[in-house]
Amino acid sequence: MKTQVAIIGAGPSGLLLGQLLHRQGIDTVILEAKSPEYVLGRIRAGVLEQGTVELIREAGAGARMDREGHVHEGVTLAFRGRRERIDLKNLTGGKTVMVYGQTEVTHDLMDARAAAGGISIYEAKDVAVHDFDSEQPRVTFVKNGEQVTLECDYIAGCDGFHGVSRQSAPRDKLKTFERVYPFGWLGVLSRTPPVAPELIYANHERGFALCSQRSDVLSRYYVQCSLDDKVEDWSDQRFWDELKARLPADVAASLVTGPSIEKSIAPLRSFVAEPMKFGRMFLVGDAAHIVPPTGAKGLNLAASDVYTLYHVLRKTYQEGRTDLLDKYSDICLRRIWKAERFSWWMTSVLHKLSDDEFGQRIQLADLDYYTGSLAGRTTIAENYVGLPYEKIE
């Protein structure tokens, strides 16, 4: 097999990149180790930055998102029993975020690729990358018991934190940075109306809580928990009682509870790999970086990588601008580290980090300062809606 760009991973970043390139006449093949059903079964967050929304529209996959997604013009920080709304739209010159589940984004991109006739090979086993430091890279895989070789010009590693792409990078050229947080998030999905029209992030002496949503009748809630906890330790009743205890009294009083549809515990970590380019192989999204979910940056950071690589490859093929290939990593990392900083800050000021009362008072002072200052509110808003993409020129 031959293609121009081999894309490893059929999550939202791989599908988004494939669809954008396809619409520019650039041939792609997407390889995915799992089945389509498995990919769609992954429950992930669903707060989309405006830049991500516009990129999905450009890919021709935004119609259902625009019909069913919920535009949010603000977000609330709760602490000391009070609520402080950050007016995203007014503080950023009109920018907003879209609440639309990552599973739905993936579904829409799958449908768009199928309609466009793009090639996606699911359940591709033993995927391996070869010769990416040469002008003739290859990807090999096993499908239906047969070994297949895919020749290509470039490889896009969109295969996540545990994928083969980063694992194949030369150890002596790869540098990683990591911070593992000593707590997790217990998340519950319930068929109940959201407690508020916009997201509420809560700092409480018992630990962090988040009120999120998927639709008018589907809610997603989280509470900070110990990494030693197991899902079985948390009955629905225990979860709802704990969530109510961490929310402002008026919010807790209006919370509608019900049976959980899905319940899971996720650890939190920050991770960055540098560089993100090795010869003709590019790392994209979770293959290169992880953020704690507190700042709603995971999928959005992957989308900004896709934006950069898409424009670099488009200009390479259409204008012969091969000089841009070497700029990919630096351009991406400038935005990544700013998003890592914001996610780290949100995590640091909203979670119970220890029983140290001095540290807790510093958190509250930080929240009080930022929410009490126009400059502070603007800083939060600018980061939450997403910093601008760097132009590829």
Image (tube, rainbow, N blue to C red):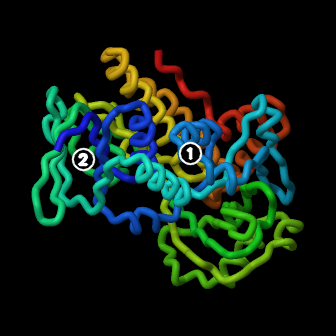
Label 2 secondary element: helix
Residue at x 75%, y 48% (from the top left corner)? 72
Position of 285 with respect to 245 (left or right) is left
N-terminal label among 1 and 2: 2
Task: Check disc 1 and report its element: helix, strand or loop.
Answer: loop
What label sits on residue 167 in the rendered view? 2
Crowding at mark 2 (Cα within 10 Å: few <14, some 14-19, many 20+): few
Above or below: residue 23 compared with residue 253: above
> Gap in Å between the C-alphas at discs 1 and 2?
23 Å
Examine the rendered structure and indicate whether residue 67 appears above or below residue 387.
below
Q: Quadrant of residue 273?
A: top left
Q: Residue at x 36, y 20 (%)?
A: 318
Q: Is residue 2 visible?
A: yes
Rendering coords of residue 155 (x, y %): 27, 37
- Image coordinates for residue 322, horizontal then vertical, percent: 31, 17
Answer with the quarter of the image where residue 68 lies.
Answer: bottom right
Q: Amino acid at mark 2?
A: Gln
Out of 46 and 168, give the one closest to the viewer.
46
Residue furthest to the right? 250
The disc placed on residue 297 is 1
User: Badge 1: how crowded within 10 Å, few (<14), some, or many (20+)?
Assistant: many
Quadrant that contains the N terminus: top left
